[in-house]
Amino acid sequence: MSSNIELETRRAAALARGVGVQTKNFAVSAENATVTDADGNTLIDFAAGIAVVNTGHRHPKVIEAVKAQLDAFTHTCHQVLPYEPYVRLAERLNDKVPGDFDKKSIFVTTGAESVENAVKIARAYTGRNAVIAFGGGFHGRTFMTMSLTGKVAPYKAGFGSMMPDVFHIPFPNALHGVSVEDSFAAMESLFKTDLDPARLAAVIFEPVQGEGGFVPAPRDFVLRLREFCDQHGIVMIADEVQSGFARTGTLFAMEAFGVAADITTMAKGLGGGLPIAAVTGRADIMDAANPGGLGGTYGGNPLGVAAGNAVLDVIEEEDLCSRANELGSRLKQRLEQIRDKMPEIAEIRGPGFMVAIELMQDGKPAPDLTKAVQAEALSRGLLLLSCGVYGNVIRFLAPITIPDAQMSQALDILEEAMLAAKGA
């Protein structure tokens, strides 16, 4: 079998440079929260495929469901020959997505596709074009979703003009001096200088910003945003692609706010490792597009749908929402202890098991220290991801099914790595 070094040589020669790779560890097998690489090294996975395998790598129930579907059929294209599991998964999401109103759903393949379709639906429903998004937000790499994303490098750099009628305002972030009032003042300024609210089809936001640094939206911000959308007949879109499916201690992060979005986008954790994404929203809004206007050849692929139904079963049967809160509490307690030795931890934040730390030195973001922590952790067998507008946030995304003993081991490694990176 090829080694990590051999595979990296082949990768560099064969893959386009734009496909960034964080490590040179090539996965050959994975089970729950453990990944084994081509050199036989085992890693504790605190990335979970970027919040995809919330139910762990190769959860037995997910694998069983996919194998059963493989024995039946792998593809018909739902628009040609529909199948019952697609309908069943839609019914379940219609029931579980926040909002006390009739809902309908569609399935696509990626998170970016779900956001694209949410914007299409909002435009069809309102007859308007403009969309407001937020600084630091991440919504995908297609042209519309790249335009919505509130970060230039690396997502927009070099790709030319963005889509028209997309406007950004600051997202509340107290650590960086942006209040809820600042966000709404920026919106009012936008309406005075560039945008008539009557042209606004949708406002899209992440209840907890993902790539932007695991920044939770303040409750007051979400409530005011809901009121604003209602006042002007604007569709509120909650991007739950990274925050969904028990990660925040509830099935969806929006449950914490007491108000519902009109449309919710989701992907990642829904498939437990299989590619599937969904858009769920108010039935009247979702029905705005004409037949044939939504869909895709692989949208709602039978294998992904089977995995999605199994994931919902696992979350319910294993009470993963409670487990996420328990693990998040343990993690935060340990991080507070580490902060006593490492004041560079400027903030510990995030609901449930969607937790992050922001590292700063002399009052400024510390991306180099962040990279050093990642490298030290990886050398000790712990895989960590960074994020944030300044690249100075470490996010913790272990599977919610991680065993207690392995979680304790990971926290010990984390502390060693952080202190070593600091030079303590």
Image (tube, helix red, strand yellow):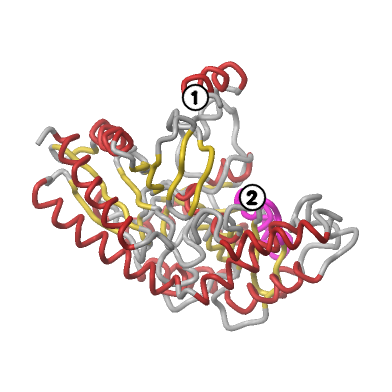
Q: What residue type is disc 1 on?
A: Ser
Of residues 309 and 148, which is closer to you in this image? 309
Front-lying residue, 209 or 405:
405
| First reached walking from the N terminus: tag 2 or tag 1 | 1
- To which residue does mark 2 refer? 110
Tell me if residue 18 comes above or below residue 187 in the rendering.
above
**Farthest-out residue, right:** 80
Q: Residues within 10 Å of mark 1 (few under 14, many from 20)?
A: few
Q: Is 292 drawn above or below residue 253 in the view shown? A: above
Query: Which is the main secondary structure of the residues drawn in magenta?
Result: helix
Picture coordinates of residue 149, whole percent (x, y): 51, 44
Residue at the (47%, 35%) spot, across then down: 37
Q: Nearer the viewer, residue 338 or 349?
A: 338
Q: Amino acid at mark 2?
A: Thr
Write down the region rendered in magenta: 107-128
Magenta stretch contains residue 110? yes
Element under disc 1? loop
Q: To which quarter of the image does residue 351 belong?
A: bottom left
Residue 264 vs residue 403: left or right? right
Q: Is residue 86 magenta?
A: no
